[in-house]
Image (cartoon, rainbow, N blue to C red):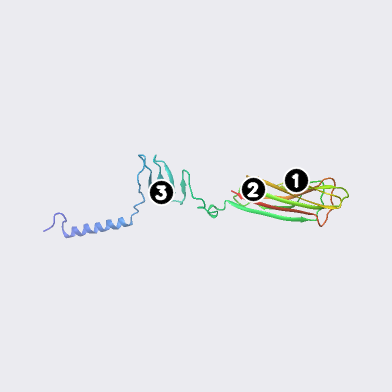
Amino acid sequence: MVNPILGGSHDLTQRLNQIEANIRALSTQQILLNASTGQGGGQPGISTDINGLHAFDSTGTETVTISGQDGSITIRGTLNLPNGSINNDALVNPVKPGSAGLSDPGHAYTTTSTVYAQQSIAVPTGFTQALVFLGVSGGAWNNTAAYDYLYVAGDINGSAGGSTPQGAAGSSYGSASAFAIRTLTGLSGGVITVGCRVWTGAAGWAANGANIANTNAIVQFLR
């Protein structure tokens, strides 16, 4: 007798085959492709679709998107991270150092402010700001018979910082040091020049092997 519920053996076999096919299809189906926890009604929620994962606040406004297309993450709000959780390399080097130093000996110095020991520091690609700290020093032999002054100042991109004078009697040596600091913005490639300005007060001092101008600069580049 044929069971009125199950039908004949052929019908039962077809039903079992169909059930097996359905189970197989479910096992390979992307069940989270269009999933949702529900949102609205004062409750936040999460949903997924072919474009990625989406998080919503209690008003139904999307606050976080993780793109399934390009892997980007968009956060519409404040991102709070523990200190030290992102290292410098992960931020593609937001700060990059630079430096320059040179000793330039033997020059004659005149009453005209002139740059010696000049150096150029290249601005790295992608950096638009720089904090420049420059220390300079200069010394020379006063070959004249009169008391005079030697002046030294730092120079950054053609702009001089404050000068330091040092007096020297005739036929004696005088030296001085000075500092200059600049915050440069709007950079786009090119170089930053640094140097040591040296000049005398009343008369020129002749070239001498003991005469020297020194430049030492540190730069921190910022994006």
Mark sitting earlier along the chain (1/3) = 3
- The residue that label 2 is drawn on is 131
- The residue that label 1 is drawn on is 163
Amino acid on which the number 3 mark rests in the picture: Leu
The CA distance from mark 2 to mark 3 is: 41 Å
Q: Where residue 76 appears, x then y in whole percent? A: 46, 43
Q: Where residue 74 appears, x then y in whole percent? A: 46, 46
The CA distance from mark 2 to mark 1 is: 20 Å
Amino acid on which the number 1 mark rests in the picture: Ser
Q: Is residue 78 left or right of residue 196?
A: left
Q: Residue furthest right?
A: 145
- Determine crowd level at label 3: few under 14, some 14-19, many 20+ residues with C-alpha closer than 10 A: many
Q: Where residue 195 appears, x then y in whole percent? A: 73, 50
Q: Where residue 185 appears, x then y in whole percent? A: 63, 45
Q: Is residue 16 left or right of residue 3?
A: right
As helix, strand or loop, the secondary structure at mark 3 comes to strand
Q: Residue at x 67, y 46 (%)?
A: 182
Q: Residue at x 41, y 46 (%)?
A: 54
As helix, strand or loop, the secondary structure at mark 1 comes to strand
- Determine crowd level at label 1: few under 14, some 14-19, many 20+ residues with C-alpha closer than 10 A: some
Identify the mark at residue 210; answer none if there is no mark. Answer: none
Which marked residue is nearer to the observer: mark 2 or mark 1? 1
Position of the N terminus by quadrant: bottom left
Mark sitting earlier along the chain (2/3) = 3
- The residue that label 3 is drawn on is 53
The CA distance from mark 1 to mark 3 is: 61 Å
